[in-house]
Image (cartoon, helix red, strand yellow):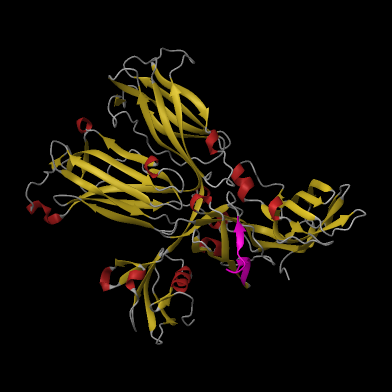
C-alpha cells in the first residue's frame, strides 16, 4: 500500500498512520512493513505498537516530530502518539464526596454505611462502611477538609438501573443517628436530546430522623454530591511510593523509618485528588478525594509498596482526561515528599503509568488501568465460542449469521450549537466499505440546537463483520464547532467468536485529542440474525399526494430485547425516518425512507412504530401505529381515514445477495 492521503505529515499521513495501527490488535507487534513507503520510496520499519502508540525507525527522511506527541522508547527509538482515540463506554453513577455537618463545631467520631441499591440488578454497592468500635472515623465539622467521609471504592461502578442511595451514619459515643434515609437517584433519568443532559451533577441531603427508633443528633446532616454520566468509563488507579537509589546523598532529606517488620517507609499525610473535565459542568466541581489524611492521623507507607487509597475505582467521562494531583508530606517534617499533577487519556487498549517526582529522591508511580464495560469483565472459556451461522427453525431455507447493526450516532459539541455537518461515516466489513452517512461541504447536514442524534443514511446492505470490522468517522462543521475523526475497530475476541462480545449494546466514544467535540457510536454485533429490507409506501384515500408535507418518525425495535431505561430507548432503536415540522418532506405517491436494511435477531420479532403527520392546505392528519413482523412475514398496513401506510419486508439470510 503506497502512501497517499489528504493531510500530509512528513512521510506518512495522519489517516494512514492511524489506520495502520488498527491493523494490529496485539499489545506488542514487530513487523517489517515494506508496503508503507515515504515520498522517495524508502520503507518505514515498524518496531513496536502499544495501544494507541506506534514506534517507527525512519529510513529515508524525517517525520515532522512536532505533529505528534514525542515520547522516548528504549534503544533510541521514538514513539509518536496518534491524535485520536476511541473508548467503549457505558452509563455510570459516581458519588464524588460525602460531608458531615453538625450544629456545633465540636469534633465527633462517626460510623455507619453509605451504598447504592440497584433494584433491577439486585445489587448492593458499598461506598462507605465503618464499624462502631473497630473502624470509626474522626470528624471535625469546623474544618473544611476534615468533615469529608473517607469514601471507598465499591466492587463496581453502578449503572442506570433504578438506583437508590442509602445512608445510615451514627455517632460513636452516643449511637445517635447523624443522618439516615433512602432516596432514588432520579437525576440519572436523562433525555439526551437535551444538549447538556448526558452528564449531571447533583447534591443530596440526608438528615437525622426518628424512623427506625433510636436517638438523634438534631440538626446534623450528611451532604452527598453525585454525578451521572451517559458516556462513562471506569479507571482503576494504583500508586506506589519509591525513592531513587542515589537520593541518600542529598541534604535535608526526609528520613525513612522502619515498621515492626523492618520495612523501610515514611509516615505521610496529605491529599490525593482526581479531577475530570466534563463537557458542560463546572470543572472545579467534579473532583474525587482518593486519599485525605490529616497530620494527626498520618499513615505508614512502605517504600516500593502501594499507597492505601480510600477510593481507587473512578467513573470518568470517556471524552475527558483523568487528572491526578498529589500533595503528600512527611509527618513532623516541613518539606513535602511528593507534590505534582499528571494526566491520563481514557482508552480500552492498554494500561499505563506515570511518575510524579518529589524532593529528596522520593517519587510516586501512578498506574491507571482503563476497564472494559462491566458486561465484558467476566472471563470466558472455549465453551463460550459461538458458530458462524445456523438454520432458522421455522424457515429451513433461511440461514442466520453474525451481523453488525449501527443504531445511532450521537454528536456532542460546545454549548450544543447548531451546526452544518459534512464528512462521512464509513464501515468496512468482509465485503468492503459502505457509507452510512455522507455529506459534502457544499451540501452539509443541518443539526439544530438541542438535537444530538445524526440520522444515518445507510447501509444499503447487510453488514457482515466476519473476522473484523472497522468504522471510520470523519465529521466537521463549517464554523469549526465540530472536528471528529477516529475509528471504531474490531478485536481478537470477535475473530474468536467469544460470546460476551455478541448481542451486547456497545457505545464507543470517538474523538480527536484536545478537541471539544466527540461522537458516540451505538451498535450491536448480533450472533445470529437475518436481514430485513423494508419499504414504506402510502395509499391516499381519494386524494392526490401532491403538496402533502410529512414529518414525524418511523422507528424499528425488537420485541424480546429490553428497553427499560431512557438510555436504551434513545440510543438502541433504529430511526428509519425522522423529520421535524420545520424540516418537512414533500412526498410523492410512493415513499421509501432513507434507511431500509435492518438486522433482526433470529429469536426476535421486528417492531415498527409509526408516528407521522400529513399536512395539506385543508389541515393536518396524524397517523400512529405499531406493527409486528415475525421473521418471514411480508407486509403490514396501518390504516387511517386519510392514508394507509403500507410496510413491506423482504427477508434474506446468508449469503444476503
Please provide percent x and percent y for residue 289: 34, 39
Q: Which residues are magenta?
A: 433-447
Please provide percent x and percent y for residue 203: 45, 32
- Look at 93% across and 54% down and name the residue there: 542
Residue 433's place in the image compared with 586, above or below, is below
Residue 263's place in the image compared with 215, above or below, is below
Please provide percent x and percent y for residue 460: 69, 67
Q: Nearer the viewer, residue 186 or 257?
A: 186
Q: Nearer the viewer, residue 438 or 416?
A: 416
Could you tell whether 652 is left or right of 371 in the image? right
Residue 184 is one of the magenta-drawn residues: no
Figure disc tally:
0
- Look at 32% across and 42% down and name the residue there: 273
Going by the picture, which residue comes out furthest to the right? Answer: 542
Could you tell whether 201 is left or right of 432 in the image? left
Residue 615 in sight here: yes
Residue 439 sits in quarter: bottom right
Please provide percent x and percent y for residue 10: 38, 78
Which quadrant, please, contains the C terminus? Answer: bottom right
Amino acid at each position: 500500500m503506497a502512501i497517499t492521503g489528504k493531510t500530509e505529515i512528513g512521510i506518512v499521513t495522519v489517516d494512514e498512520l492511524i489506520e495502520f495501527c488498527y491493523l494490529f490488535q496485539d499489545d506488542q507487534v514487530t513487523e517489517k512493513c515494506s508496503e508503507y513507503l515515504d515520498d522517495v520510496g524508502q520503507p518505514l520499519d515498524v518496531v513496536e505498537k502499544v495501544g494507541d502508540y506506534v514506534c517507527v525507525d525512519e529510513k529515508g527522511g524525517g517525520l515532522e516530530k512536532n505533529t505528534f506527541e514525542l515520547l522516548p522508547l528504549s534503544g533510541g527509538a521514538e514513539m509518536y502518539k496518534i491524535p485520536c482515540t476511541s473508548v467503549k463506554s457505558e452509563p455510570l453513577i459516581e458519588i464524588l464526596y460525602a460531608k458531615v455537618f453538625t450544629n456545633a463545631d465540636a469534633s465527633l467520631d462517626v460510623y455507619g454505611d453509605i451504598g447504592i441499591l440497584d433494584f433491577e440488578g439486585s445489587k448492593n454497592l458499598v461506598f462507605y462502611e465503618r464499624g462502631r468500635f473497630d473502624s470509626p472515623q474522626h470528624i471535625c465539622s469546623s474544618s473544611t477538609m476534615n468533615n469529608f467521609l473517607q469514601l471507598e471504592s465499591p466492587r463496581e461502578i453502578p449503572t442506570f438501573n433504578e438506583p437508590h442511595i442509602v445512608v445510615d451514619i451514627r455517632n460513636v459515643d452516643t449511637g445517635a443517628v447523624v443522618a439516615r434515609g433512602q432516596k432514588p437517584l432520579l437525576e440519572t433519568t436523562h433525555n439526551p436530546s437535551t444538549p447538556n443532559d448526558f452528564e449531571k451533577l447533583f447534591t443530596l441531603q440526608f438528615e437525622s430522623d426518628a424512623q427506625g427508633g433510636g436517638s438523634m443528633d438534631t440538626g446534623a446532616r450528611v451532604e452527598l454530591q453525585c454525578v451521572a454520566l451517559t458516556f462513562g468509563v471506569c479507571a482503576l488507579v494504583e500508586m506506589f511510593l519509591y525513592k531513587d537509589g542515589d537520593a541518600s546523598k542529598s541534604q535535608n532529606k526526609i528520613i525513612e523509618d522502619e515498621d515492626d517488620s523492618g520495612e523501610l517507609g515514611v509516615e505521610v499525610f496529605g491529599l490525593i485528588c482526581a479531577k475530570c473535565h466534563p463537557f458542560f459542568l463546572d470543572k472545579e466541581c467534579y473532583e474525587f478525594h482518593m486519599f485525605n489524611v490529616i497530620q494527626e492521623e498520618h499513615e505508614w507507607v512502605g517504600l516500593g509498596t502501594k499507597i492505601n487509597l480510600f477510593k481507587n475505582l473512578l467513573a470518568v467521562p470517556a471524552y475527558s482526561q483523568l487528572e491526578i494531583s498529589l500533595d503528600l508530606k512527611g509527618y513532623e517534617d516541613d518539606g513535602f515528599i511528593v507534590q505534582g499533577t499528571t494526566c491520563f487519556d481514557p482508552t480500552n487498549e492498554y494500561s499505563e503509568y506515570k511518575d510524579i517526582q518529589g524532593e529528596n529522591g522520593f517519587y510516586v508511580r501512578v498506574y491507571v488501568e482503563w476497564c472494559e464495560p462491566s458486561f465484558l469483565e467476566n472471563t470466558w472459556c472455549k465453551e463460550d465460542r459461538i458458530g458462524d451461522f445456523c438454520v432458522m427453525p421455522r424457515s429451513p431455507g433461511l440461514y442466520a449469521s453474525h451481523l453488525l447493526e449501527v443504531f445511532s450516532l450521537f454528536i456532542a459539541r460546545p454549548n450544543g450549537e447548531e451546526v452544518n455537518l459534512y464528512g462521512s461515516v464509513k464501515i468496512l466489513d468482509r465485503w468492503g466499505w459502505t457509507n452510512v452517512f455522507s455529506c459534502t461541504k457544499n451540501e452539509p447536514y443541518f443539526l439544530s440546537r438541542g438535537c444530538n442524534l445524526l440520522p444515518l443514511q445507510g447501509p444499503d446492505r447487510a453488514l457482515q463483520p466476519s473476522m473484523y470490522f472497522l468504522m471510520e468517522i470523519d465529521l466537521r462543521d463549517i464554523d469549526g464547532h465540530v472536528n471528529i475523526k477516529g475509528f471504531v475497530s474490531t478485536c481478537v475476541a470477535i475473530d474468536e467468536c467469544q460470546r460476551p462480545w455478541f448481542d451486547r449494546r456497545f457505545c464507543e466514544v470517538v474523538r480527536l485529542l484536545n478537541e471539544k467535540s466527540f461522537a458516540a457510536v451505538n451498535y450491536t454485533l448480533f450472533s445470529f440474525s437475518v436481514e430485513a429490507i423494508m419499504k414504506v409506501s402510502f395509499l391516499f384515500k381519494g386524494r392526490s399526494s401532491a403538496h402533502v408535507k410529512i414529518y414525524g418518525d418511523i422507528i424499528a425495535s425488537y420485541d424480546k430485547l429490553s428497553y427499560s431505561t431512557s438510555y436504551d430507548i434513545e440510543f438502541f432503536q433504529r430511526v428509519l425516518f425522522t423529520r421535524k415540522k420545520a424540516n418537512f418532506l414533500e412526498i410523492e405517491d410512493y415513499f421509501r425512507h432513507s434507511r431500509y436494511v435492518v438486522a433482526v435477531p433470529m429469536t426476535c420479532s421486528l417492531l415498527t412504530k409509526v408516528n407521522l403527520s400529513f399536512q395539506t392546505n385543508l389541515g393536518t392528519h396524524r397517523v400512529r401505529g405499531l406493527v409486528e413482523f415475525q421473521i418471514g412475514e411480508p407486509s403490514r398496513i396501518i390504516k387511517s381515514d386519510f392514508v394507509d401506510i403500507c410496510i413491506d419486508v423482504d427477508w434474506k439470510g446468508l449469503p444476503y445477495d
